[in-house]
Amino acid sequence: MSSHPSTLECALLLVGVTAGISAPFQAETSPHLGSVRGTVTNAVTGERLSKAYVLLSSTSATRANYPVVTDSQGRFRIESVEPGNYHLQAERQGFLEGHYGGGFTGSAVQLQLSAGQDLFDLNIALTPQAVIAGHVTDPDGDIWTHVHVNVFRSVWTHGRRQIQGWSSGNVNDRGEFRIGDLPPGRYYLRADPDYAWEKTHRHARDTQPPLLLQPTWYPDH
Protein backbone atom coordinates (compact mmCIF):
# COMPACT_ATOMS: atom_id res chain seq x y z
CA MET A 1 0.00 0.00 0.00
CA SER A 2 1.35 3.42 -0.90
CA SER A 3 2.23 5.87 1.86
CA HIS A 4 1.04 8.79 -0.22
CA PRO A 5 -1.77 10.85 1.32
CA SER A 6 -5.28 9.81 0.41
CA THR A 7 -7.22 12.57 -1.30
CA LEU A 8 -10.94 13.24 -1.51
CA GLU A 9 -11.87 15.40 -4.49
CA CYS A 10 -15.03 17.43 -4.12
CA ALA A 11 -16.66 20.65 -5.21
CA LEU A 12 -18.67 23.09 -3.13
CA LEU A 13 -21.46 25.18 -4.63
CA LEU A 14 -22.36 28.40 -2.86
CA VAL A 15 -26.08 29.11 -3.09
CA GLY A 16 -27.40 32.66 -3.06
CA VAL A 17 -30.43 33.12 -0.84
CA THR A 18 -32.15 36.08 0.57
CA ALA A 19 -30.81 37.16 3.99
CA GLY A 20 20.62 8.85 9.78
CA ILE A 21 20.19 10.42 8.01
CA SER A 22 20.71 10.03 11.79
CA ALA A 23 22.49 12.41 14.09
CA PRO A 24 26.19 11.53 14.65
CA PHE A 25 26.57 9.03 17.43
CA GLN A 26 27.72 10.61 20.66
CA ALA A 27 30.17 8.71 22.80
CA GLU A 28 28.91 8.26 26.31
CA THR A 29 31.05 10.27 28.69
CA SER A 30 29.51 8.97 31.89
CA PRO A 31 28.16 5.61 33.05
CA HIS A 32 25.21 7.52 34.49
CA LEU A 33 23.96 8.51 31.03
CA GLY A 34 21.55 6.32 29.10
CA SER A 35 20.42 5.80 25.51
CA VAL A 36 17.23 5.31 23.50
CA ARG A 37 16.99 3.30 20.26
CA GLY A 38 14.22 2.32 17.93
CA THR A 39 12.53 2.70 14.55
CA VAL A 40 9.86 4.84 12.88
CA THR A 41 7.42 2.99 10.64
CA ASN A 42 4.32 3.48 8.49
CA ALA A 43 1.36 2.46 10.70
CA VAL A 44 -0.52 1.08 7.67
CA THR A 45 2.16 -0.82 5.75
CA GLY A 46 4.82 -1.38 8.41
CA GLU A 47 7.43 0.15 6.08
CA ARG A 48 10.35 1.77 7.85
CA LEU A 49 10.55 5.51 7.31
CA SER A 50 13.80 7.30 6.60
CA LYS A 51 14.28 11.01 7.33
CA ALA A 52 11.71 11.04 10.10
CA TYR A 53 12.37 13.67 12.74
CA VAL A 54 12.46 12.14 16.22
CA LEU A 55 12.37 14.14 19.44
CA LEU A 56 13.00 12.83 22.96
CA SER A 57 11.78 15.53 25.35
CA SER A 58 11.98 15.64 29.12
CA THR A 59 8.76 15.91 31.10
CA SER A 60 10.56 17.75 33.91
CA ALA A 61 10.96 21.49 34.32
CA THR A 62 14.37 21.35 32.64
CA ARG A 63 12.67 20.48 29.29
CA ALA A 64 15.83 18.86 27.92
CA ASN A 65 15.40 17.88 24.25
CA TYR A 66 17.29 15.30 22.20
CA PRO A 67 16.50 15.56 18.44
CA VAL A 68 17.69 13.03 15.83
CA VAL A 69 16.74 11.94 12.30
CA THR A 70 16.17 8.34 11.23
CA ASP A 71 18.64 6.73 8.84
CA SER A 72 17.88 5.00 5.54
CA GLN A 73 16.51 1.98 7.46
CA GLY A 74 14.18 4.07 9.60
CA ARG A 75 16.36 3.62 12.69
CA PHE A 76 17.25 6.19 15.32
CA ARG A 77 19.62 6.23 18.25
CA ILE A 78 19.88 8.85 20.98
CA GLU A 79 22.86 8.64 23.31
CA SER A 80 24.20 10.49 26.35
CA VAL A 81 20.73 10.97 27.78
CA GLU A 82 20.34 12.16 31.35
CA PRO A 83 18.25 9.88 33.62
CA GLY A 84 14.64 11.01 33.93
CA ASN A 85 11.18 10.82 32.43
CA TYR A 86 10.64 11.51 28.73
CA HIS A 87 8.16 11.58 25.86
CA LEU A 88 9.20 10.27 22.48
CA GLN A 89 7.61 11.59 19.29
CA ALA A 90 8.26 11.65 15.55
CA GLU A 91 7.06 13.40 12.43
CA ARG A 92 7.62 13.03 8.72
CA GLN A 93 6.30 14.73 5.61
CA GLY A 94 3.00 13.16 4.53
CA PHE A 95 2.25 11.62 7.94
CA LEU A 96 0.52 12.69 11.12
CA GLU A 97 2.79 13.44 14.04
CA GLY A 98 2.92 10.41 16.33
CA HIS A 99 4.00 9.58 19.87
CA TYR A 100 5.51 6.38 21.19
CA GLY A 101 2.68 4.30 22.63
CA GLY A 102 0.01 6.83 21.77
CA GLY A 103 -0.31 7.11 17.99
CA PHE A 104 -1.91 10.35 16.82
CA THR A 105 -4.88 10.26 19.24
CA GLY A 106 -3.94 8.67 22.55
CA SER A 107 -1.77 10.04 25.32
CA ALA A 108 1.94 9.52 24.87
CA VAL A 109 3.61 6.88 27.02
CA GLN A 110 6.08 8.29 29.52
CA LEU A 111 9.50 6.67 29.29
CA GLN A 112 11.47 6.25 32.50
CA LEU A 113 15.20 6.17 31.86
CA SER A 114 17.48 5.08 34.70
CA ALA A 115 21.19 5.81 35.04
CA GLY A 116 23.12 3.82 32.43
CA GLN A 117 19.98 2.22 30.98
CA ASP A 118 19.61 1.43 27.28
CA LEU A 119 16.00 1.50 26.05
CA PHE A 120 15.83 -0.31 22.72
CA ASP A 121 13.36 -1.75 20.15
CA LEU A 122 11.05 1.24 20.56
CA ASN A 123 8.78 1.81 17.58
CA ILE A 124 6.84 4.92 16.63
CA ALA A 125 4.16 4.16 14.04
CA LEU A 126 3.09 7.16 11.97
CA THR A 127 -0.30 7.26 10.26
CA PRO A 128 -0.39 8.60 6.67
CA GLN A 129 -2.29 11.87 6.56
CA ALA A 130 -5.53 12.21 4.63
CA VAL A 131 -6.22 15.17 2.34
CA ILE A 132 -9.47 16.77 1.22
CA ALA A 133 -9.21 18.85 -1.96
CA GLY A 134 -11.67 20.47 -4.30
CA HIS A 135 -12.92 23.76 -5.64
CA VAL A 136 -15.62 26.30 -4.88
CA THR A 137 -18.04 27.80 -7.40
CA ASP A 138 -20.76 30.43 -7.31
CA PRO A 139 -24.41 29.72 -8.25
CA ASP A 140 -23.52 30.14 -11.94
CA GLY A 141 -20.80 27.51 -11.77
CA ASP A 142 -17.94 30.01 -11.98
CA ILE A 143 -14.99 29.75 -9.60
CA TRP A 144 -15.34 31.72 -6.40
CA THR A 145 -12.45 32.93 -4.24
CA HIS A 146 -14.09 35.07 -1.54
CA VAL A 147 -14.75 32.10 0.70
CA HIS A 148 -13.27 30.03 3.53
CA VAL A 149 -13.60 26.22 3.70
CA ASN A 150 -14.15 24.61 7.10
CA VAL A 151 -13.77 20.92 7.94
CA PHE A 152 -15.89 19.33 10.68
CA ARG A 153 -15.67 15.88 12.21
CA SER A 154 -18.25 13.71 13.92
CA VAL A 155 -17.22 13.00 17.54
CA TRP A 156 -18.80 11.50 20.64
CA THR A 157 -19.09 13.87 23.63
CA HIS A 158 -20.77 12.77 26.87
CA GLY A 159 -22.48 9.94 25.06
CA ARG A 160 -23.82 12.10 22.26
CA ARG A 161 -22.62 12.51 18.68
CA GLN A 162 -21.67 16.06 17.81
CA ILE A 163 -20.12 17.90 14.87
CA GLN A 164 -16.85 19.50 15.89
CA GLY A 165 -14.70 21.95 13.96
CA TRP A 166 -11.45 20.24 12.98
CA SER A 167 -9.55 22.22 10.37
CA SER A 168 -9.96 24.90 7.72
CA GLY A 169 -8.36 26.41 4.66
CA ASN A 170 -8.53 29.19 2.11
CA VAL A 171 -9.04 28.90 -1.62
CA ASN A 172 -6.48 30.08 -4.16
CA ASP A 173 -7.01 32.35 -7.16
CA ARG A 174 -8.46 29.40 -9.08
CA GLY A 175 -11.09 28.64 -6.46
CA GLU A 176 -9.21 25.53 -5.31
CA PHE A 177 -8.61 24.35 -1.76
CA ARG A 178 -6.49 21.61 -0.23
CA ILE A 179 -6.70 20.70 3.46
CA GLY A 180 -4.25 18.08 4.71
CA ASP A 181 -2.90 16.67 7.95
CA LEU A 182 -6.21 14.89 8.62
CA PRO A 183 -6.50 11.59 10.52
CA PRO A 184 -8.79 8.84 9.20
CA GLY A 185 -12.47 9.50 9.84
CA ARG A 186 -15.74 10.91 8.52
CA TYR A 187 -15.68 14.62 7.72
CA TYR A 188 -18.14 17.32 6.68
CA LEU A 189 -17.28 20.38 4.60
CA ARG A 190 -18.80 23.82 4.73
CA ALA A 191 -17.98 26.84 2.59
CA ASP A 192 -18.36 30.13 4.45
CA PRO A 193 -18.47 33.31 2.34
CA ASP A 194 -16.33 36.31 3.21
CA TYR A 195 -19.12 38.34 4.78
CA ALA A 196 -17.14 41.58 4.79
CA TRP A 197 -16.66 41.24 1.05
CA GLU A 198 -20.30 40.22 0.52
CA LYS A 199 -21.70 43.21 2.40
CA THR A 200 -19.35 45.64 0.68
CA HIS A 201 -19.81 44.43 -2.90
CA ARG A 202 -23.22 42.76 -3.01
CA HIS A 203 -25.45 44.74 -0.64
CA ALA A 204 -27.63 46.99 -2.78
CA ARG A 205 -29.04 49.97 -0.89
CA ASP A 206 -32.57 49.31 -2.12
CA THR A 207 -32.49 45.56 -1.40
CA GLN A 208 -33.91 44.37 1.91
CA PRO A 209 -32.64 41.96 2.98
CA PRO A 210 -29.40 41.90 0.94
CA LEU A 211 -28.77 39.11 -1.55
CA LEU A 212 -25.73 37.49 0.05
CA LEU A 213 -24.12 34.10 -0.51
CA GLN A 214 -24.79 31.82 2.44
CA PRO A 215 -22.77 29.05 4.14
CA THR A 216 -23.13 25.83 2.13
CA TRP A 217 -22.43 22.26 3.21
CA TYR A 218 -21.00 19.59 0.92
CA PRO A 219 -22.84 18.05 -0.77
CA ASP A 220 -25.23 20.93 -1.35
CA HIS A 221 -28.27 18.74 -2.11
Image (cartoon, grey):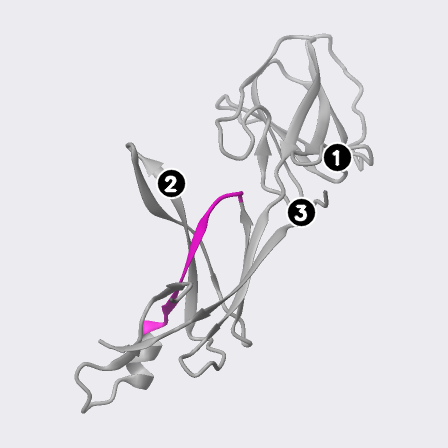
x, y percent for residue 218: 42, 62
Q: Which of marks 2 and 1 is nearer the N terminus?
A: 1
**Which label number is shown at residue 104?**
none
Q: Which residue is drawn at 81% across and 30% down?
A: 24
| Residue on which the image places disc 1 | 47
Q: Residue at x 18, y 91 (%)?
A: 206
| Residue on which the image places disc 3 | 93
| Residue on which the image places disc 2 | 155
Q: Distance between the residues labelled 3 and 2?
A: 26 Å
Vertical order, 30 against 41 (above or below): above
- Say which of 2 and 212 sits in front: 2
Q: What stretch is highlighted in magenta?
A: 183-195
- The amino acid at mark 2 is Val
When asked about the image quadrant of residue 127, the answer is top right
Asked if the stretch drawn in magenta spans residue 219, the answer is: no
Asked if the stretch drawn in magenta spans residue 194, the answer is: yes
Give the class, few, some or many, for how many residues have Cα within 10 Å of label 1's Cα (few <14, many ≥20).
some
